[in-house]
């Protein structure tokens, strides 16, 4: 039995959150003790397992700001994670053998001050998730990017979610060329998809009764998810099918939505406006912050999943859809190349409206295609992404022996890292103020 502390920045709803929740459940199923530490946990916007007591959660430091007037998101994410780590190491009564940390690596020096072994899950290098169009942005990001690389290298084990992310990790963190990460594919807890769920009263409004071909998009309302492509493909589809076929088509765009996130609000309104621009308002249903029941209802009733992000790190939603016997149309890059078998469990397309529309039309011309590809997709998911395989892999990782090392040298290194980080942050803030 191993005592494992999970340190995560914001335990809301998203792909990263789904992975760590599944990881916690997987380790509990192997007899380990698990506890989550986070800076934010809203019980009205989280996964059920973190709300119903299946996983123990402690939230600290939510009083710290998330940004300064719409800026310094990364800086404050670092501060909040360092605060959580300081609480865990020095003030909590929890004593852990392993710390499972993800997304933000700068807290690793603090976590190293404990005797625990550090496992860091790199969903994707953070320095690649932001643009640096101005000199000020490049100056601001320089110390943060350097810290990300150096502190990531301090973890005892680094995990990534796909071979695509592993290659990106190696090419991005050139100083860590000798620390090739291990691939741990996300998984599904099949039981949550197999258990019959009573439909909610609101579920009847999700899909029009007259719709025979329902295309479903599930993703957070973020611009990088390229959700515009789903609407553009639907508009293109209208021009290559008959009016009779068009009457049977409907698109549901369901997405993670948080009132605290400005981009969620802005992008949702942008998509609604785009639907009006294409005269598709009657053909599109927008769903925000859907429940687990609504998600299962949508997956059960849809014809196909439309997955629009390019260079997606992994993508758990296609796995969920295929397990529910629904084929997937996705962009031919990133994680979907490792999860979707083109022509067998779905279609991999160029990231343009015409390619997606042509793939969508195949389901209208051959109504039995959804069942054929869906059956193959579920078989593939059970074989490669089962919860048991995921749990056993994680069990092996957390029970690996501790690497021998000098505790005083580790502590000194961690202390210097924290000092350098604080000095760099103060310098960056002063630079902005003077500018």
Image: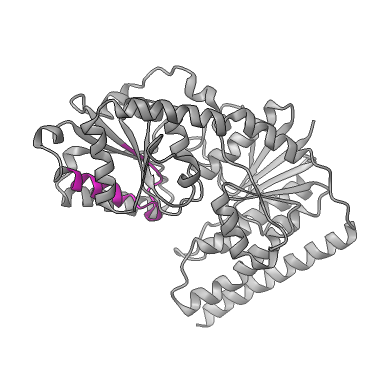
Residue 185 visible to an observer of this rendering: yes
Query: Considering only vertical position in the picture, is 71 above or below 291?
Result: below
Q: Which residues are drawn in magenta? A: 216-237
Q: Which residue is drawn at 71% across and 58% down?
A: 179
Residue 269 visible to an observer of this rendering: no
Q: Residue at x 46, y 68 (%)?
A: 131
Q: Which of 72 and 396 is in front in this view?
A: 396
Q: In this view, does 386 lie to the left or right of 375?
A: right
Task: Assess whether residue 221 is covered by the magenta stretch.
Answer: yes
Q: Nearer the viewer, residue 4 or 345?
A: 345
Q: Is residue 101 left or right of residue 406?
A: left
Query: Considering only vertical position in the picture, is 137 above or below 53?
Result: below
Where residue 236 sits: x, y (%)?
19, 48
Q: Nearer the viewer, residue 316 or 179?
A: 179
Q: Is residue 119 left or right of residue 47?
A: right
Q: Which residue lies furthest to the bottom in this view?
A: 434
Q: Residue at x 38, y 55 (%)?
A: 263
Scheme of colours in the image: one colour
Q: Which residue lies furthest to the left in this view?
A: 243
Give the position of the N terminus as an image quadrant. Answer: top right
Q: In which quarter of the image is residue 424?
A: bottom right
Where residue 39 sits: x, y (%)?
60, 48
Q: Quadrant of residue 419?
A: bottom right
Where residue 293 sits: x, y (%)?
41, 25
Task: Assess whether residue 111 is covered by the magenta stretch.
Answer: no
Q: Residue at x 29, y 46 (%)?
A: 356
The number of discs equals 0
Where residue 103 sits: x, y (%)?
59, 52
């Amino acid at each position: 039995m191993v005592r494992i502390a999970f340190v995560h920045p914001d335990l809301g709803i998203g792909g990263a959150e789904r992975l760590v929740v599944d990881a916690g459940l997987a380790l509990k199923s192997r007899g380990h003790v698990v506890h989550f530490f986070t800076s934010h946990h809203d019980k009205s916007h989280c996964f059920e397992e973190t709300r119903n007591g299946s996983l123990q959660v402690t939230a600290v430091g939510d009083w710290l700001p998330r940004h300064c007037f719409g800026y310094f998101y990364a800086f404050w994410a670092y501060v909040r994670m360092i605060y959580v780590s300081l609480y865990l190491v020095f003030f909590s009564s929890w004593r852990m053998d392993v710390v499972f940390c993800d997304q933000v690596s700068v807290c690793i020096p603090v976590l190293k001050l404990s005797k625990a072994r550090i496992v860091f899950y790199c969903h994707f290098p953070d320095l690649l998730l932001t643009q640096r169009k101005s000199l000020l942005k490049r100056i601001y990001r320089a110390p943060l990017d350097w810290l990300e690389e150096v502190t990531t290298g301090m973890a005892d084990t680094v995990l990534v979610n796909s071979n695509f992310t592993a290659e990106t990790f190696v090419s991005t963190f050139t100083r860590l060329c000798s620390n090739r990460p291990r691939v741990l594919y996300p998984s599904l807890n099949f039981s949550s998809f197999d258990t019959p769920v009573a439909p909610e009263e609101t579920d009847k409004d999700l899909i029009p009764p007259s719709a025979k071909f329902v295309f479903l998009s599930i993703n957070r309302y973020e611009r990088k998810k390229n959700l515009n492509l789903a609407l553009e493909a639907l508009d293109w589809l209208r021009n290559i099918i008959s009016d009779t076929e068009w009457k049977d088509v409907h698109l549901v765009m369901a997405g993670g939505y948080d009132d605290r996130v400005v981009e969620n609000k802005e992008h949702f309104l942008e998509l609604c406006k785009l639907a009006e621009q294409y005269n598709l308002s009657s053909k599109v249903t927008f769903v925000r912050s859907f429940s687990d029941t609504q998600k299962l209802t949508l997956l059960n009733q849809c014809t196909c999943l439309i997955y629009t992000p390019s260079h997606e790190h992994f993508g758990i939603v296609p796995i969920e859809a295929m397990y529910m016997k629904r084929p997937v149309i996705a962009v031919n890059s990133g994680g979907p190349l490792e999860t979707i078998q083109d022509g067998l469990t779905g279609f991999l397309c160029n990231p343009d409206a015409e390619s997606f529309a042509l793939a969508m039309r195949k389901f209208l011309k051959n109504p039995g295609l959804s069942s054929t590809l869906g059956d193959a997709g579920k078989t593939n998911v059970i074989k490669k992404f089962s919860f048991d395989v995921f749990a056993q892999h994680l069990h092996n990782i957390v029970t690996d022996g501790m690497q021998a090392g000098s505790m005083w040298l580790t502590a000194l290194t961690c202390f210097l890292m924290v000092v350098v980080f604080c000095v760099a942050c103060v310098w960056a803030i002063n630079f902005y103020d003077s500018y």
